[in-house]
Amino acid sequence: MATDTIKKVCVVGAGMSGLAAARELRHEGLAVTVMEQRSDVGGQWLYDPRTDADDPLGAAVPVKVHGSMYASVRLISARECMGFSDFQFVPRPGAAGRDARRFPGRREVYCYLKDFCAAFGLADAVRLDTRILHVAVAPPGEEARGGEVRWMVRSVHVEPDGSEDGVAAEEVFDAVVVANGHYSQPRLPKIQGMEEWSRRQLHSHSYRVPDPYHDEVVVIVGCGDSGLDIALDLSGVAKEVHLSAKSVEAATATPAVSRMLANHAGMRLHPQIDRLCEDGQVVFADGSCVAADTVIYCTGYRYSFPFLDTAGAVAVDAGGGRVGPLYEHTFPPALAPSLSFVGVPMRVFAPWFFEAQARWVALVLAGKAALPPEAEMMRAVEEYYRARELAGVPAHLAHAIPVVDRSEIWEFVYRHSDLPRMEDWKVELFMSSLLNSKDDRETFRDRDDDNESIREGLQRWRLGAGAQYEATLAAAACSSSGNHVHDDAEALARAPRPPLPAPCQVSTMN
């Protein structure tokens, strides 16, 4: 598609990646409509206490309840590593209800995304309570000038309970950016007896608070972030908590799980489940068993785009872990640049990486950056797949860019965007937090053992980034106080990026 014909863009989703895309697209002068099925922006960080009682495993596609966040969630990365390049995630202790901790809870992230939306005048671009039903190449007669494809988007208004209200509407867009996230559709294991087991089973997608599991025997399948956090959440409420890991050796390779077991008398570690018995017994691979009241599957999520119809040009593999083919995790070669994805990669510095991805998409759609020919993009995708397979990376981790081998992340950001470089002290802080989480899962978020380099970086960051944050919000408030909110919002999003304040020279942090 000739990029000079792209003027009107639909963004699917108003979470972290969708808002990043909206800001970058508007910055390039494109008309943006963000469609969000929930009643507010924030994506998964918008907490929803409801669950689907009829489908606690989240087996339906799509799920009825989009939110997967549990009440006790706190960040596992420090807030200093979790901000947009020009709108850092600074504490706002003076604002009511805010969480100033370095590893804040879920509501603080939601408030930050709300602030970002306000600061860059994006609210008027977001169409809330709008579910996208179908996205496909527009029919003949709807082509852009020169015959390039456009996209027909069919959507419907939804009520807070998820029920559809009214007649579906159809609109034609020059391009579509898919940014609906990947933490809604559960990935479930296949275990003998799951379908017949008469007691409670749910995916972590349906877990919110520990109270319903009072005095129960709970088996948690999976020792990843959510599995360990939910185990700790339940430890003071449930009678017993049994963790089931694919590999006991791998689970205890670092001290975190061993410390949890030592600190909580009712917590046990087992190998993977062999079968579930109708009488409530859970039998593990080593032959041990436990009579359980509830099994919670903390087994991750699948990529899911049930609304997207590309006639096979883009597909999710059978395991739900690979979307493809996607050039650089972003553009499907056969449909680029009019179709793109922002937010597919995992284990990256979010939202910084998604900001770079969105920036690249915006530059391409605005005609300021070019993509390779389709055949060259396909070759690059195939080579990437082969390299991952040779490295022994399973298909469901196809988009898990390894943070510990951070060169791939940096190379992407610096190759496709003009974002400032990630400061060394932030990388140190991220790696320090990661190592601490593997040492003591219960206390790592509240430890204060930064080295001098991190302390100096934090001091500069708090002084400079904090002033920038408040100034950007103040400017946005002034811009939207007049009678032309829409015009002001677009001008704000298209304004030059505010410069980063000069670092304050200090030698230590008090």
Image: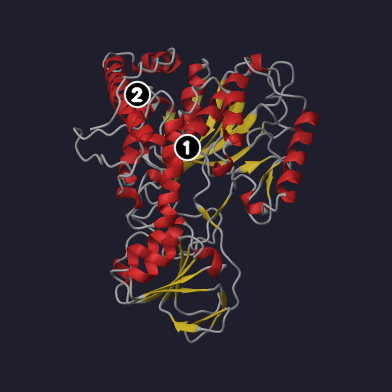
Amino acid beneath label 2: Ala
Q: Which residue is mark 2?
A: 119
Above or below, comparing residue 220 to residue 58 in the picture: below
Residue 180 in picture, x, y percent from top left: 52, 41
Q: How is the image coloured?
A: secondary structure
At horizontal 33% and vertical 13% (from top left) the residue drawn is: 484
Which class describes the residues within 10 Å of circle 2: few (<14), some (14-19), or many (20+)? many
In the displayed structure, does residue 76 sit left or right of residue 343? left
Residue 43 in picture, x, y percent from top left: 43, 42
Amino acid beneath label 1: Ala
Near-viewer residue (413 or 136): 413
* Label disc, if present, on residue 350 of the rendered structure: 1
* Label disc, if present, on residue 27 of the rendered structure: none
In the displayed structure, does residue 35 sit left or right of residue 382? left
At horizontal 54% and vertical 42% (from top left) the residue drawn is: 403
In the displayed structure, does residue 279 sit left or right of residue 80? right
At horizontal 24% and vertical 39% (from top left) the residue drawn is: 98
Label 1 SS: loop
Label 2 SS: helix
Q: From this viewpoint, which residue is outermost toward the bottom? A: 279
Above or below, comparing residue 448 to residue 234 in the picture: above
Residue 274 in picture, x, y percent from top left: 58, 78
| Quadrant placement of the C terminus | top left
The answer to whether one can see residue 331 in this image is: yes
Near-viewer residue (155 or 148): 148
Above or below, comparing residue 315 to residue 331 in the picture: below
Residue 60 in picture, x, y percent from top left: 54, 59
